[in-house]
Every structure is written in structure tokens, then in C-alpha cells.
Amino acid sequence: MPGIKNYTPNKQLLKVMSINSIAVLVRLVTGFILSKAIAIFIGPQGLGIIGNLRSFINSIQTIASLGFYNGVVKYVAEHKNNIKELSKILSTSYYLGFIAMLGTSMILYFFAPFWSSYVLNSSDYAHVIKILAAGISLMIVDYFCLAIINGFSRYKVYTILNITTTVFSLIVTVILLWQYRLEGMLYAIVITPALALFITLIIIFKQKSFVQLLKASNISWDYSKKLIEYSLMALLTAVIIPPTIIAIRNHIVDVEGLTQMGYWEAMNRISNYYLVFVTSLLSLYLFPKLSAVKTTKQFKQEIFSFYKTLMPLVIIGLLILYFFRVFFIKLLLTSEFLPMQRLFSWQLTGDFFRILSSVLAYQFMAKKMTKSYVFTEILSAVIWYFSSIYFINNYGYEGAAIGYLVCYSSYFFVLVIWFRKYFFTKE
């Protein structure tokens, strides 16, 4: 990879990182408070159940919106100065998403006992699923509003929304958790994403002008085909990754119990505190950049610039987290969670490879490489599931973290081979 040493840190990326870091800092503080509250009021036994519901909602949100988020971001970014094309994009995504949302809501509501048993290991929480079915419409409207803001590259607005909704969600969640313990936490997970819409509508710039662009007569068959290409990729992830994680959690319960499943879920929560910083950078900065590149040289420049600017910070952060893991467990959780420290080496190394591979994988979405994305996504899910089951059977709940490392290290090397022509051939 000649010439990589000549790359300097990307100033625009650093600017986005600095803006984004404010939202991440708020998430870290609120996440610390929430994790502490969960550890005190629920403990490791309930943490895995909470994790299953979060994974399920992530999947449902993508399905109910037809996975249009990245497509809306891309085409809004391309045509933000063209009112006619913009109206076609927004009208097509909104009305098709509305139909999908209604269908998803009905399936959730009428089959609530089944979903409760599958996700929460008990039909006693069917009413929680019904509340989710009722609130999914608000959640999806908020989802599309955020995609529009992202498409217009309004980083500051996006950051303000993130901070406001994060603080609001914390207040509602802590109150419900304090009053109703596990059931209150389940309520909070379901209702806070829907309630976030009201904050979005208050803060979003010129939302009335967006509403005026939503016309059923402007639904475009051409844009529906283009959006569906992104939809296939997002929907594949939604129907493969969350169910895979739920299956791994349930297998830990079968082999060792709810407490051990809670340890692994707590480890995932700690990972998510810093991974959200990386994933938001990928969405806010890298995705629009890769969508615009035209040559292999530009692709290499963007990838290496991103790596060189971000990865040193990631490595330092991971090392600090590893060497002070006991301190962070006691700080973020309680001493009851100390057995999970054996997961750190596997999980943090897996996170390192996950970040490396995520940067490359965004090229699939940016360039609509649907077949390549489908193949590699299915392959990684298969590796993740079967390696986790194997290692859990042999090493207990620690095996879930080992399987995670095997999955993402394999995924990264598969992507390097997949994109070898971008790195090792001349323009």
C-alpha cells in the first residue's frame, strides 16, 4: 500500500469527530448513570432480557421503515438543492414506509404473546409488545426525520437532537426503572424512541417545508427501485444479526443461566459506549464520502485517511479500558459483575476488528454492491453463530466473546480479500 505514510489526519473528519464527541460524551455520562441504575435495581439476571428486547426493536425499526435510512441519506445528499427530485425521494420513502409500518404494527399487535415468548422468554410481557406496536409509527417518522437531517449534512442539528433525546430518554427510563424495576425498563425501551419524535419535530429546521414535499402524486417508481437496493441490504442485516444475537444469548441461558447471560450483555453494553461514536462517524461522515468517490485512488485515500485519523484513538481507548477493566466494571456496574472481566480481552480485540471491517463494509452500501453485501453478511452471521455455540459449549459464557472475535476478525480478512483490487492495483 504505497504512499500511506504520506497521509495526514483528515481535518474535516476531525471537525465532525469534535462535534460528534459532544453527543458521545453525553451518551457516556447518561449510559453510566443508566448502567449503574440497571445494575442496582435489576442485576445481571435482567440485563440479558433487556438486551434481547433492544435487539428486537432494532430489527423491527429497520423492517418497519423498509431499511430506507441509508438510501434516503444518499439521495437527499445528492439532490438537496433540487426541490422536484427531493419531493420524489421523500414522498416515495415516506408512503412506502408508511405501508410497511402499518403491516409491521399489525403483526406485532396480533401475535404479541408469540413475540413476547420468543424475545423475552415469557408470554407475560405481551402487553409490552402491544405498546411497541402502537408506538412504532412515531418511531418510524422520527427515523425518517433523522435521515433527512443526515442527508443535508446538518451535523450540529443532528448532535443537538442526539443530546436532547439521550437526556430525555435517561430521565424517563430511570423513573420507570425506579418505580417498576424490570418491567419499567422494558416499558422505557419501547416508548422512549417513539417519544423522541416530539423533540425531533421541535428542533428540526424547516420541518414544515419537508411536510409540503410529501405528496402521494410524487411517488416515483425509479426511486422506489433505487431505495429497494438499499432496503435489501438493511433488511438482511435486520433479519440476520439481531436474531443471531438473541439465539446466542438464549444458548448461554441454556448452558449456564441468566446471570452468565447478563455478564455477556453487560460486556456488550460497555462496547456500545464507544462503538456508537464510531458508527455515528461512519454514518455522518464516511458514508456520504464513499458515495461520492469515483476512482480507486479516491477510495484508498478516504479509507486510509479515516483509519489514520481514527484508529490510534481507538487503540489507546481499548488499552485503557483493558488495563483498568476492574475499575470500569465497578464504576459502570457493581462488584456483582466482576466475573465478566474474563471477557475483556476477547471482546475488545473483536471490537478492534469490527471497527476495521465496518469502515470497509460501508463501501457495499455506498456503491449499492448488494450481492457482495448479502454474501459477506450471511457468511459473518454464520461464522458468529456457530463459533459462539461451539465455544460456549466448551468454555461457558466466555465462549460468546471468543465467537465474537472469531466472527469479526474473519469478516475483516474476507473484506480485505474482497476489496484487494482497490488496494493493490494501480488506477
Image (cartoon, grey):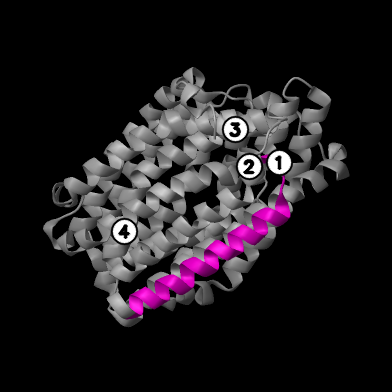
Q: Residues within 10 Å of mark 4 (few under 14, many from 20)?
A: some
From the top left corner, tell me how far across and down residue 380 is, in percent.
54, 62
**Earlier-in-chain disc, 4 versus 3:** 3
How far apart are labels 1 and 3 at the CA level?
A: 15 Å
Relative height, residue 320 to residue 344 (above, below): above
Q: Which mark is residue 300?
A: 3
Q: Which mark is residue 346?
A: 4
Q: Nearer the viewer, mark 4 or mark 3?
A: 3
User: At label 2, which amino acid type do we have?
Assistant: Gln
- Give the left or right position of residue 407, taking residue 178 as reference: right
| Residue drawn at the location 38% of the way across and 60% of the way down | 186
Q: Residues within 10 Å of mark 3 (few under 14, many from 20)?
A: some
Q: Residues within 10 Å of mark 2 (few under 14, many from 20)?
A: many
Q: Are marks 1 and 2 in contact (CB under 8 Å)?
A: yes
| Residue drawn at the location 47% of the way across and 44% of the way down | 356
> Which region is colored magenta?
366-393
| Quadrant of res 182 | bottom left
User: At label 1, which amino acid type do we have?
Assistant: Lys
How far apart are labels 4 and 3 at the CA level?
A: 29 Å
- The residue to which callout 1 is attached is 367
Q: Is residue 292 magenta?
A: no
Q: Is residue 389 magenta?
A: yes
How far apart are labels 4 and 2 at the CA level?
A: 27 Å
